[in-house]
Image (cartoon, grey):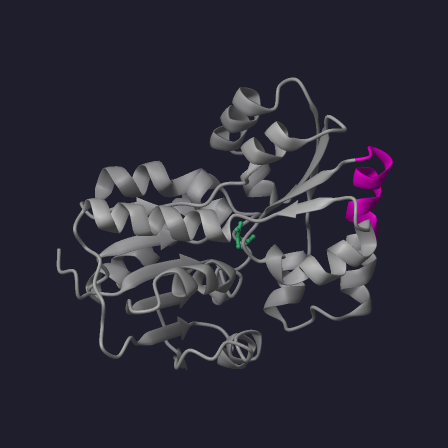
């Protein structure tokens, strides 16, 4: 493995850029290569076999471009396909899973919420994590149907988004959750809206920083860290590049965002 290669990152679409942001902030001198499989979003409603096949396709593309590590910046792909990926390829994989453990350890009300895709909530990996860390507390699980589609179509600030979030957060409020775990890498873009709806008492947990730190640890272990003079950030999407461009407009790192048929 060449330590000069990029950190490869993929998601079903634009949401994993929330993870990319944390990685770029944590390791600003690394090259990154981000793949948004927006044409196939949402993954959340697909079968485990379909999610695995798409994850293999994305992985093959990133490896062909010289990625030295792959970050699966998608809870749905991690919980359904990461075991298969790790068994099939030699390079290290970092995954993202809903952060149930910190929420379960910190809750005072003994009630936490989790908002995630159907694919994540029904996965065996999620069931195992939940059983291990949250068996003595109340976990309100809600499927965020439609949220990914609205983010993918540039409708974060829309009446439809507000309506869906109001509906999904109602059972969380009723159950007095004091922690809300965001179990989908698209959802950090909804934090301002979610916190305005839930109010100050609820701690919203997303896993971006934890994933970035783990990526750095594993790169260090494999002696793959590299400080580039001129770090490149390439973004490929098989959807509309404008959505990625707008979502990343506030980030000042120089980047190239383009359409690619992968
Ligand atoms: N961003 C993804 C996740 O973290 C996938 C959402 C989807 O495509 O359904 O689960």
Q: Is residue 147 above or below residue 86?
A: below
Residue 32: in magenta span:
no
154 displayed left or right of 54? right
* Magenta-span inclusion, residue 172: yes
Q: Residue 195 location in percent, x, y?
A: 75, 55
Quarter that holds the C terminus = bottom left
Q: Residue at x 42, y 78 (%)?
A: 253
Q: Using the image, determine if residue 254 lies above or below residue 105.
A: below
Please give the name of the residue rendered at 80% of the width and 61% of the height, measured from the top-left corner: 162
Quarter where residue 4 is shown: bottom left
The quadrant the N terminus occupies is bottom left
* Residue 121: quarter of image: top right
Can residue 258 be seen? yes
Furthest residue toward left: 1
Residue 248: x and y in percent read: 52, 75
Residue found farthest to the top? 136
Q: Nearer the viewer, residue 245 or 136?
A: 136
Give the residues in magenta.
Answer: 166-176
Residue in front for this viewpoint, 78 or 248 = 248
Q: In the picture shown, does residue 181 fall above or below 106?
A: below
- Please give the name of the residue rendered at 29% of the width and 75% of the height, measured from the top-left corner: 231
Would you say the magenta stretch is mainly helix, strand or loop? helix
Image location (x, y in percent) of residue 196 = 80, 58
**Horizontal side, residue 244 vs residue 165: left or right:** left
Residue 165: horizontal and vertical position, in percent?
77, 54
């Amino acid at each position: 493995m060449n330590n000069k290669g990029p950190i490869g990152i993929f998601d079903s679409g634009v949401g994993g850029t929330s993870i990319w942001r944390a990685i770029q902030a944590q390791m600003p001198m690394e090259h990154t290569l981000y793949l948004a499989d927006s044409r196939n979003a949402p993954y959340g409603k697909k079968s485990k076999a379909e999610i695995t096949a798409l994850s293999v396709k994305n992985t093959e593309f990133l490896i062909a471009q010289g990625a030295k590590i792959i970050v699966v910046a998608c809870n749905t792909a991690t919980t359904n396909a990461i075991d298969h990926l790790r068994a099939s390829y030699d390079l290290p994989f970092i995954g993202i899973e809903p952060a149930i453990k910190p929420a379960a350890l910190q809750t005072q009300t003994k009630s936490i919420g989790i908002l995630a895709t159907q694919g994540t909530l029904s996965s065996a990996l999620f069931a195992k994590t939940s059983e291990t860390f949250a068996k003595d507390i109340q976990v309100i699980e809600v499927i965020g149907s439609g949220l990914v589609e609205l983010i993918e179509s540039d409708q974060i600030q829309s009446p439809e988004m507000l309506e869906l979030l109001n509906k999904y957060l109602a059972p969380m409020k009723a159950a007095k959750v004091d922690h809300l775990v965001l179990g989908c890498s698209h959802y950090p873009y909804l934090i301002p809206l979610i916190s305005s709806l839930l109010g100050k008492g609820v701690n919203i947990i997303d896993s971006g920083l934890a994933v970035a730190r783990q990526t750095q640890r594993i790169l260090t272990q494999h002696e793959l860290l590299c400080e580039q003079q001129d770090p490149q950030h390439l973004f490929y999407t098989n959807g509309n590049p404008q959505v990625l461009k707008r979502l990343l407009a506030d980030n000042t790192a120089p980047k190239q965002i383009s359409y690619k048929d992968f």
